Amino acid sequence: MWRALFAVLFCGLWSLPAHAGIPETIAEMKPSIVGVGTVLATRRPPVRLLGTGFVVADGRHVVTNAHVLPDLVDGEKREYLAIFFGRGSKARPRPVEVAKLDREHDLALLRFVGSRLPAVKLGRADEVREGQRYLFTGFPIGAVLGLYPVTHMGMISAISPAAIPVASPRDLDVRMIRRLRKPFDVFQLDGTAYPGNSGSPLYHPETGRVVGVINKVFVKETKEKVLEKPSGITYAIPVRHVRALLQSAGLAF
């Protein structure tokens, strides 16, 4: 009898999924994740996807990286900044305006009008520990095949400053000097991200609470400047800076 009972329990445990709850978390997060780019009707293709963002606060605001935003939007030709929501070929643009910028931490807050989109829940950066695994979802290859969000998992490999001292003053530039004067920690991940992932939320695989914002360019250009062959390491801006951005805009979170 004991052998039969053990066999039933063993088989039941063996059949459990390796990451129970992760598919449900991803499914809940996807409606809050949007593309960020520009629309110009006379351009082919008219949509230019520049990065990823996620809906926050009242459902009418989006957080992304500041470097995702274009240097110039040609209003004379009726080009406009937009977010893209929906999936596949049914994705739709919605015009946005820049509500707040935090260039020091490479964050931007966008605002749009119209019906609300599902907003994410924010976690706490001080609860993140090295060795923990988190998910991030975004658009690493843009919208070549339509708007299909992609999810990766990465371990927190280190929590370290956004810029590190260099061996020689010759390796310093203006951006690195500025960040060395006002250092702040970032999350270093062993997961692979691409430029289109910039602005993706980094979130807990079970609760879905966002703890950071994926950053593929801003941090890497200072942390890996002295490397002969830059690595595939990914970085994320801690969510405490998102909270500060929302607070400066008078938004509840």
Image (cartoon, rainbow, N blue to C red):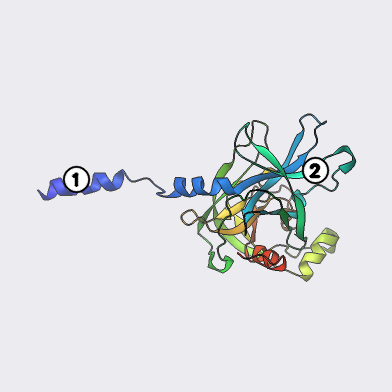
Q: CA distance from mark 2 to mark 1?
A: 62 Å
Q: Amino acid type of disc 2?
A: Tyr
Q: Position of residue 69 (x, y in %)?
A: 77, 49
User: Furthest-left residue in view?
Assistant: 1
Looking at the image, can residue 226 be seen? no
The residue shown at (67%, 38%) is 92
Q: Earlier in the sequence, mark 2 or mark 1?
A: 1
Q: What is the number of the mark on residue 41? A: none
Do the residues bearing badges 2 and 1 touch, measured as CB atoms within 8 Å?
no
Pointer 1: what residue? 7
Circle 2 residues within 10 Å: few <14, some 14–19, many ≥20 = many
Looking at the image, can residue 6 be seen? yes
Rendered image quadrant of residue 251: bottom right
Identify which residue, 180 or 87, lies in the foreground.
87
Quadrant in which the C terminus appears: bottom right
Identify which residue, 192 or 88, lies in the foreground.
88
The residue shown at (77%, 41%) is 38
